[in-house]
Amino acid sequence: MLAFLNALTSYTFLSRALIVGVLVALCAALLGVSLVLKRYSMIGDGLSHVGFGALAVALALGVTLMAFAIPVVVLAAFLLLRISENNKIKGDAAIALIASSALAIGVIVTSLSGGMNADINSYLFGSILAMSEGDVYLSVGLSVVVLVLYLLFYHRLFAVTFDETFARATGTRAGLYNMLLAILTAVTVVVGMRMMGALLISSLVIFPALTSMRVCRSYRGVMVCSAVLSVVCFVVGLAASYLVGTPTGATVVVVNLVSFLLFAAVGRLRKLVN
Amino acid sequence: MPLITCRNVSLQYESTVVVEDVSFAVEEGDYLCIVGENGTGKSTLLKGLLGLLPLRGGEISFSGMERREIGYLPQQTPVQRDFPASVFEVVLSGTLGRMGRSPFYSREAKCAARENMARLGVDKLAKRSYRDLSGGQQQRVLLARALCATKKLLILDEPVAGLDPLVTSELYALIRKLNREGLTVLMVTHDLSGVLKDANKLLHLDKTVRFFGTPAAYLDTRAGQRMAGGGSNAGVS
């Protein structure tokens, strides 16, 4: 652990990864609670695939990656909700449809513009070396915006998640808050994708919420627990990946998996005891 | 002036007209039951009243209250059954319509939530998780939430569906008490026999209004006798 702390102070790429990672983990955990409960778990996964497609296109065009990817993914989030609301194509099918299409377009664009290079590999599985100083500022800014908006609308998002019909009947504009949720998720996914990888970022959204639901009984309890858990798992995963030399994104996911199994066991035990 | 007036209301659900030319009025203090078989437009009519579905024709007007001040008890969704939220959090969310632009609950909202929990006898459950409660307790919690949203009108969508007979009669007693305290009640139900004594008005819906009047007069009609027979059978099963 001491070796990791030493490394943190001497390598800027590590401290950058820590700052951005902690913020993204926090955002993802909070949003994840609503997404999992609304049965929108796959939305993070779908959006990350769209993010990959957008990055591939941005690379080919030679434009700024984040500036290009964020609007595209936000648009995809908007589309996803619209499609799943009109009931003709169910939500999960809509996500699968958009996700695989975006991935396919990304792969085609990449192969046309010079083949699978190291950049693409790092977008799929993540790299902690990917963050430039400008990326760090942008990521921190966006994460703070996501956190503030989420906290401001916390009670309304709860109401819309628990019972959309009731919320709408009492004058809450449910559609607006669903959209807010999707847009915040889109931003979080794009910001976190570079470090965690397009294929792994959705775990950051889903795991902490599912894990804390094993033991927590109130909504606020679940929120606080998944926020803390998500940050702890990220830091442990980052440290482990540095010390053992494994890929960061994958290591963070495995740490999350271990904590999920632990919490599930505790939840089971408590049920048996009662 | 009636609390709610429906004039020639028509509603459609996915391009089929399911409610057509429905007119009725609800006075303050009424206990109105809407009965009818499955797929006769009862729930759709409720959605129209709540403003969740656009009207295809006709008009619905409220007097002395706004539409968002309705206390609504919807049917439970699968999402809610295993939702990790405390009873207090659920009840408190009923005050959301009154909080305006403020992002947080006011002290009055929290007081109102506690009062309504006490009113329905669920104040002792405040810290319990909603998903660990029995079906009857969950309905009481949702009813407390509905009370937080209204001072005048409760709209209940099949409140006793899936409850056992004892819990059902307890819930009816509770609704009767609320009605006597001055709340107007509008209830969609299958269980006609359970509400005949309490309701003062009855509406039989089968796409359009088949009957609208007192329960006693309804029992004299052929449809009423059939529904009452069917209703008590449904209550037993």
Image: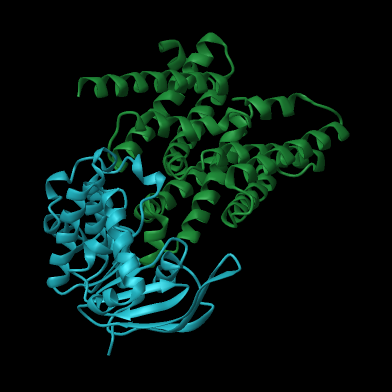
Chain colours: A green, B cyan
Residue A194 location in percent, x, y? 62, 32
Above or below for B148 versus A142: below
Q: Is residue A120 left or right of residue A146?
A: right
Q: Give A113 or A17, whichever is nearer the viewer.
A: A113
Which quarter of the figure is the N terminus of chain B placed in?
A: bottom left
Q: Give A233 or B80, whichever is nearer the viewer.
A: B80
Q: Residue A12's image quarter?
A: top right
Across the whole image, how many numbered discs are drawn on residues? 0
Residue at 25 percent across and 22 percent down: it is A270
| Residue B99 visible in this rendered orientation of the protein | no
Q: Residue A63's image quarter?
A: top right
Residue B78 location in percent, x, y? 40, 45
Residue A57 location in percent, x, y? 77, 41
Residue at 54 percent across and 21 percent down: it is A11
Q: Is residue B74 left or right of residue B141?
A: right
Q: Give B78 or A80, whichever is nearer the viewer.
A: B78
Above or below for A236 versus A161: above
Above or below for B178 versus A244: below
Q: Residue B50's image quarter?
A: bottom left
Residue at 29 percent across and 38 percent down: it is A221
Residue at 25 percent across and 75 percent down: it is B215
| Residue A88 visible in this rendered orientation of the protein | yes
Q: Is residue B223 left or right of residue B206?
A: left
Residue A67 location in percent, x, y? 66, 47
Above or below for A133 versus B139: above
